[in-house]
């Protein structure tokens, strides 16, 4: 089938390459000419495991091309996928749909024949209906473009795998024809038994907002438990393991730490709550404000802990932050909790160095005031405290004995609760996390010996 994919960010570029990989004839379109040039030459504009290979394979097959002209898209596609961003509006919680609208406005007048327009971006419920009217008003005489919604659930770091082997395909359609078209698009996956859920557009739009809200709520739930654990001297990691054995709950997304970030979860829960207000059901989703607040409090709690561990004042303290991206296996620093904490430490006067295996360049662009580098030992030299804030696997492989010899003070906050703490403690490190009691055996943290004191000073 002839598909266009409009918008070549993390979602669109991966979708375009994967659709070509499963046999479709795909045109990827973006207004960013540098991005289009890079993709056409087989150079991924971002880091995503496995994307390099699938892009190279798709280009070599001749089934994947790129353009920055929506008129090419109009001519090429029988199905047009909209994959542009829906960021948070400046000065509001709601989603900004200007890029989606611009695609529709730029594409529709050039459509030579009837076709299907399929949104994949996360949008407020009701967008399909609104775009249907917008397209009807712009389409050339005799041309009919139906709009469907087909939310995308891919995770960064696993984008290729999630696109080729999704948990489910959800489509929101108004008629049989669109449903059959989308079944043909996804046929190579559906034959492997991937569940296909066909529903109305509003339900499909809601599935995505609801899924991300649920995931965010699950993370904030365990982070709320970490606050209670800190006050009670209990262990949130053991609590999560014990909860997770209940198959109704499940262990995934119960990792307490500095919380969620990225280009989706934070803005999606805000946009969903804002849309609920518009629909007159604001109270139903007001708990999402709490989810957001708990999430942001984990950052504040981490900063407070760092301040206490460096003697109550961060001014002039040498701090090294391990991790800048919002999650490992990505170079994405959008709304990264790690970077937000690093920036806040800097603002409080600390001398901050940030290390990240893949995100250093993006971190520098987002926060030029922070020093960053790719050599771990250099970044840690003479540090008075380390904060482990993105759980890259290479940090788990660091030799804590070697690192103890490089830093000024062997003090670690594990903001992701992912390092082998016993090995670090055995190497002489003071190790602290949110929501876990600290070992009374730690010699360099006298406060931890007194549980009452620990309660008082917990972040
Ligand atoms: C998310 C959804 O998972 C995906 O389905 C949707 O399509 C896009 O949004 P992504 O943003 O790639 O995907 O990241 P995800 O793996 O969901 O993690 C989001 C954030 O939550 C990260 O910052 C991660 O570190 C954090 N997280 C995740 C936790 O703090 N604890 C956990 O237990 C899990």
Image (spheres, rainbow, N blue to C red):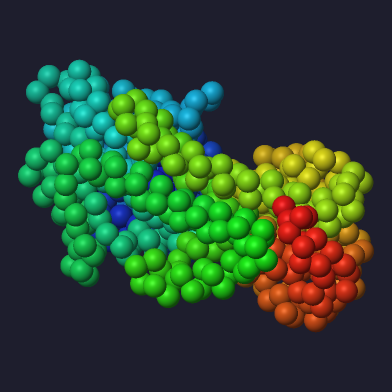
Task: Name the spot of residue 112 as percent of width and height, x first.
Answer: 18, 29
Compare residues 266 and 228 and report the one nearer the observer: 228
Q: Residue at x 70, y 68 (%)?
A: 437
**For this view, does 342 lie left or right of residue 37?**
right
Q: Quadrant of residue 120?
A: top left
Q: Residue at x 46, y 51 (%)?
A: 216
Task: Name the spot of residue 307 as percent of width and height, x first.
Answer: 82, 50
Q: Quadrant of residue 138?
A: top left
**For this view, does 330 lie left or right of residue 283?**
right
Task: Name the spot of residue 263 as percent of width and height, x first.
Answer: 50, 44
Q: Residue furthest front?
A: 452
Above or below, comparing residue 419 to residue 69 in the picture: below
Residue 8 in view in this figure: yes
**For this view, does 17 lie left or right of residue 320?**
left
Compare residues 47 and 125 and report the one nearer the observer: 125
Q: Quadrant of residue 410?
A: bottom right
């Amino acid at each position: 089938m002839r598909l266009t994919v409009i918008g070549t960010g993390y979602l669109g570029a991966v979708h375009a390459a994967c659709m070509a990989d499963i046999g479709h004839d795909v045109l990827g379109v973006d207004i960013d000419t540098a991005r289009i040039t890079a993709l056409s030459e087989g150079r991924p504009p971002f880091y995503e495991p496995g994307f390099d290979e699938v892009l190279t394979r798709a280009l070599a097959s001749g089934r994947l091309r790129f353009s920055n002209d929506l008129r090419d898209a109009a001519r090429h596609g029988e199905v047009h996928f909209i994959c542009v961003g829906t960021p948070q509006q400046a000065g509001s919680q709601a989603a900004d749909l200007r890029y989606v609208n611009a695609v529709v406005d730029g594409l529709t007048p050039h459509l030579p024949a009837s076709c299907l327009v399929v949104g994949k971006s996360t949008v407020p419920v009701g967008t399909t209906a609104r775009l249907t009217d917008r397209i009807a008003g712009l389409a050339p005489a005799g041309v009919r473009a139906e709009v469907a919604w087909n939310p995308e659930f891919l995770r960064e770091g696993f984008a290729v795998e999630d696109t080729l082997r999704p948990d489910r395909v959800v489509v929101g359609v108004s008629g049989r024809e669109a449903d059959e078209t989308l079944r043909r698009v996804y046929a190579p996956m559906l034959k492997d038994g991937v569940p296909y859920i066909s529903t109305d557009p509003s339900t499909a739009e809601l599935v995505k907002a609801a899924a991300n809200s649920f995931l965010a709520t699950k993370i904030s739930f365990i982070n709320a438990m970490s606050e209670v654990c800190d006050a009670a001297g209990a262990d949130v990691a053991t609590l999560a393991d014990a909860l997770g054995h209940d198959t109704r709950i499940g262990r995934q997304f119960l990792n307490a730490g500095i919380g969620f970030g990225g280009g989706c979860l934070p803005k999606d829960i805000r946009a969903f709550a804002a849309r609920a207000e518009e629909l007159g059901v604001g109270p139903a989703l007001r708990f999402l404000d709490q989810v957001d607040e708990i999430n942001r409090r984990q950052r504040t709690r981490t900063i407070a802990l760092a301040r206490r561990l460096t003697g109550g004042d961060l001014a002039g303290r040498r701090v090294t932050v391990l991790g800048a991206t919002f999650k490992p296996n990505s170079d994405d620093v959008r709304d990264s909790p790690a970077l937000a904490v690093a920036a806040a430490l800097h603002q409080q006067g600390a001398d901050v160095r940030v290390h990240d295996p893949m995100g250093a360049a993006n971190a520098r662009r987002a926060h030029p005031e922070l020093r960053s580098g790719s050599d771990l030992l250099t970044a840690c030299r003479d540090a008075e405290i380390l904060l482990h804030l993105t759980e890259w696997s290479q940090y788990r492989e660091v030799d804590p004995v070697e690192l103890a010899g490089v830093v000024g003070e062997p003090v670690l906050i594990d903001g992701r609760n992912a390092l082998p703490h016993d090995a670090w403690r055995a190497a002489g490190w003071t190790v602290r996390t949110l929501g876990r009691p600290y070992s009374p055996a730690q010699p360099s943290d006298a406060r931890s010996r007194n549980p009452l004191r620990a309660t008082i000073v917990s972040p």
